Image: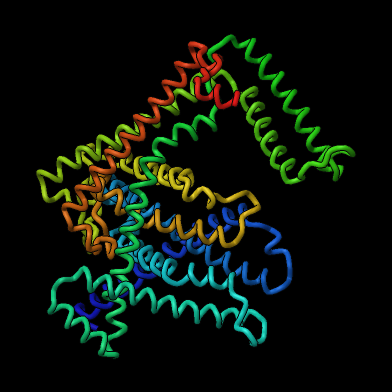
Amino acid sequence: MDAGEHDGLSAREQLFHERVRECIICALLFASLYILCYFILTHFKRHTDFTTVDEDAAVNRIALWLCTFTLAVSLGAVLLLPFSIISNEVLLSFPQNYYIQWLNGSLIHGLWNLVFLFSNLSLVFLMPFAYFFTESEGFAGSKKGIMARVYETFVVLLLLTLLVLGMVWVASAIVDNDAASRESLYGEVLDLLSMRQYLWEYYLPYLYSCISLFGVLLLLLCTPFGLSRMFTVTGTLLVKPRVRAIKCNKVLTQQQLNCTGFEEAAISRKINSGKTSCWLNFDMEVLRQQYLAIHAHRITLETRRKASAWQRNLGYPLAMLSLLSLTGISVLVVCFHVLELLLDDAAMPRGIQDAPLGKVSFSVFGSFGAALQVILIFYLMVSSVVGFYSSPLFTKLLPEQHDTAMTKIIGNCVSLLVLSSALPVLSRTLGITRFDLLGDFGRFNWLGNFYIVFLYNMLFAGLTTLCLVKKFTWAVQAELIRAFGLHKLPLPVTRSLQSSKLS
C-alpha cells in the first residue's frame, strides 16, 4: 500500500469516526430530552387513563409516547439557536483545544436538519395519528381491538393527507403566477415516477413554510401580550415588599392564615362526610372548587409569612427590574433592526448551507453580546408561552396537574411545537441574533420578502410598546387609587340607575 492509498484510507476512517461520533452525540442529546419530557408529561397526565388493562390504556400509552417525542423535538427546537451561538463562542475562545474538537459545523448543521425533519414528521404524521388513534373505535362491523383502530386511523390519516395536499396544490397555484412553472408542475404530477421527488422537494417544504408562517404570526400575537403578562405572573410567584409596619403586617398575615385554615378545615370536613347538612344541600363540585381556591390562598399566605426580608425587599424589585430591562432591550434591538433593514440588505434573514463556526462572533460585543442574545431568545420563548396560555382563545388548553386528558396533551404538544419551531425564524427576523438559519429553515419563501419582514418588525415593536404602556398605565392608576384610599369610597350612582331601581 503506497502513501496515497494510506492517506485516502485514513481520511475515510476519520470521516467515518466523525459521523459515528455525531450520531452518538445526537442520540444522547435526544434521549436526554425524551426522558425529561416524559417526566413532564407524566406529571400532567390523568392516571385513570393508564391504570386499566383494556385497549384504551394501551392506546393512551402509545399516544403518550408520540407526544413525548413531539415535546422533545419542541424542546430541541428551542435549544437549537442558543446551542449554536454558545458553540460558536466556545470555539472562538478555545480554537485549538483537543477536548472540544467534536463541536464543529457538521454537528450543528446535522442538529438543525434533524430538528427540521422531526418537526415535519411530528406535525404532518405523528400528532394527527395520535389524535385519530385516541378517538378511533374501529370500522362498523369489524372486530374490535387495537388493529381495528390502527386501520381506521390510517384511512382517516390518508384522507386528511390527500385533503392537505390538495389545499397546498391550490394555494401554490394561486400564489405562483408563472404559467410556465404551472405547466411544468402539472407535468411532474402526472409523471408517477417523479411523484416522490416532487413531494419531498416541493410539497413538504411549501407546507412547512406555511406552518412556519402561521407559527411566526402566532408568536407575533402571543409574545407582546406575554411580555406584559410576565410582570403579573412574576408578581404572583414572588412576595411583594411590605409598605406598612412590619409588626402590623405579621399580625394581619397570621390572622388571615388562621381564618383561611379554619375555612379549609370546614370545607374539607363537609367533603369527607359526603353530605353538607341535613337542612342544606350544596353541590359537591362547587365545594371542591372552593376548597382548591382556599387551599391555594393558604399556601400563598404561608409563603408570604415565611419569606425573609431579603426575599421580600430585594428579590421582588430585582425580578421586576430584570424583566423591565430585558423587555426594553428587546424593543430597542427590534427598533435598531428596523433601521438596519432600511439601510442594509445584509440585515435580511437568509439561509446558509454551511455553518462557519469559530470564525467570527455573531455579536458586536463579543461573548457578552452572545450571552445576552441567548438570554433574550429564552425570554422571548417563555413570554410567548405565557402569552399563549393567557390569551382567551387558548386558556382552556392550560394543562392541569395529574388531571389532563390525552386529547388536551396532544393539543398542547402541537401548540408548543408550532411555537418552538418558529422561534429560530422569529429571532433572526427580529434581529435578536445574527446567526443565519441553517438547513431547510432558511428555505422559506416569505423570508426573502422585504415588506413582510419590515412590517413584522414594525408590528412587533408597536404591539409590545402598546401592551407595556397599557399594562403600566393601569398598574400606576390602581396603585395611586389604593395609595390615596379612593378604592374604599362608594361608587357613585347615576340618576338613570336610581330610577330603574325604584321602578
Q: Position of residue 98 (x, y in %)?
A: 33, 54
Color style of the picture: rainbow
Foreground residue among 77 and 44: 44
- In percent of width and height, residue 372 lies at 32, 38
Residue 249 position in % (x across, y down): 63, 14
Q: In the rendered view, would you say 243 is above or below 377?
A: above
Q: At x 64% / y 22%, what residue is drawn?
A: 305
* Image location (x, y in percent) of residue 58: 65, 71
Residue situated furthest front in the rendering: 503
Quadrant showing the N terminus: bottom left
Camera sees residue 256: yes
- Say whether residue 111 is left or right of residue 428: right
Residue at the spot 67% in from the left edge and 71% down from the top edge = 56
Q: For the point 54% across and 14% down, which residue is it?
A: 489
Quadrant showing the C terminus:
top right
Q: Is residue 265 left or right of residue 177?
A: right
Q: Is residue 216 left or right of residue 38?
A: left
103 relative to 334, above or below: below
